[in-house]
Image (spheres, rainbow, N blue to C red):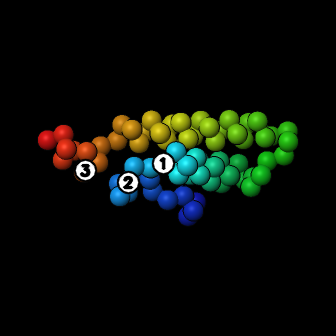
Amino acid sequence: MCRSIKPLRNMDHPATGQEIEEAALQYVRKVSGYRKPSKANEEAFQRAVDEVAESTRRMLDTLHNKHSDILAA
């Protein structure tokens, strides 16, 4: 795991869009091996960042945490 990706669940506040985008960017950088992709790979790189961010948003929206479980009870 990339050490610069911080956990976004169970923080003292809901993850912001910027935090999710930054985590997605770090993940795609790690997996692709590119810090900054070439022009030829730029579109695929950005699409991957967008897809990872969207998937992360959906996951965080559906995960239960202690705070939401207490409110639901």
Task: Report the residue at 18% width, 47% height from top.
Answer: 70
Q: Which residue is mark 1?
A: 16
The spot of residue 7 in percent (x, y) is 45, 56
* Residue type, label 1: Thr
Task: Report the residue at 44% width, 53% height from top.
Answer: 8
Return the disc, 1 or 3, that comes first in the chain's sequence: 1
Image quarter of the C terminus:
top left
2 and 1 marks in contact (CB < 8 Å): yes
Q: Which residue is mark 2?
A: 13
Task: Report the residue at 68% width, 35% height from top.
Answer: 47
* Residue type, label 2: His
Return the disc, 3 or 2, that comes first in the chain's sequence: 2
Q: SS of the residue at dot 3?
A: helix
3 and 2 marks in contact (CB < 8 Å): no
The spot of residue 54 in percent (x, y) is 53, 36
59 lies left or right of 38 = left
Q: Which residue is mark 3?
A: 67
1 and 3 marks in contact (CB < 8 Å): no
